[in-house]
Amino acid sequence: MGALLWLLVPFVAGAAASAWAWSAGRRDPGPPDRDTWKDLDRFDRLRAVLSTEERCKAA
């Protein structure tokens, strides 16, 4: 009986996770993002702005 109880724990955890995902609205996650070059350019611009020495300093 103890072994069946240990098998029941992951089953209940999986059922709870699936119920949470369903209630959170993740029923259809949609297609993956394929525009990685635009994301890379945006990241490079952000990194360049944050790494400049002439940042706005609070008084």
Image (cartoon, rainbow, N blue to C red):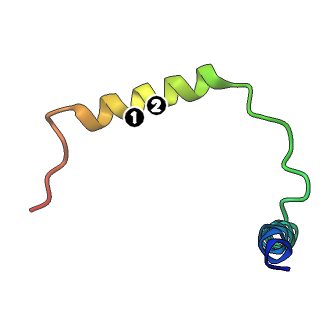
**Which of the 4 image quarters holds residue 16?**
bottom right
| Residue at the image point whose x is 88% and y is 68% from the top | 22
**Which of the 4 image quarters holds residue 38?**
top right
On the rendered structure, is 21 left or right of 52? right
> Of 52 and 32, which appears nearest the observer?
32
Label 1 Cα neighbours within 10 Å, binned few <14 / some 14-19 / many ≥20: few
Q: Is residue 22 above or below residue 40?
A: below
| Residue at the image point whose x is 14% and y is 52% from the top | 57
Q: Is residue 55 above or below residue 24?
A: above
For the residues marked 1 and 2, what is the alpha-carbon distance in whole angstroms? 5 Å
Residue 29 numbered tag = none
Q: Position of residue 30 (x, y in %)?
A: 86, 44
Q: Position of residue 10 (x, y in %)?
A: 78, 67
Label 1: element kind: helix
The residue indicated by pointer 1 is: 46
The C terminus is located in which quarter? bottom left
Q: Give amino acid for label 2.
A: Phe
Label 2: element kind: helix
| Residue at the image point whose x is 50% and y is 30% from the top | 42
Residue 43 numbered tag = 2
Q: Mark 1–mark 2 contact, CB under 8 Å?
A: yes
The N terminus is located in which quarter? bottom right
> Of 15 and 21, which appears nearest the observer?
15
Q: Give amino acid for label 1.
A: Leu
Q: Is residue 25 above or below residue 42?
A: below
On the rendered structure, is 56 left or right of 14? left
Extreme-left residue of the structure: 59
Q: How many marks?
A: 2
| Residue at the image point whose x is 57% and y is 29% from the top | 39
On the rendered structure, is 45 left or right of 50? right
> Of 7 and 42, which appears nearest the observer?
7
> Of 29 and 54, which appears nearest the observer?
29
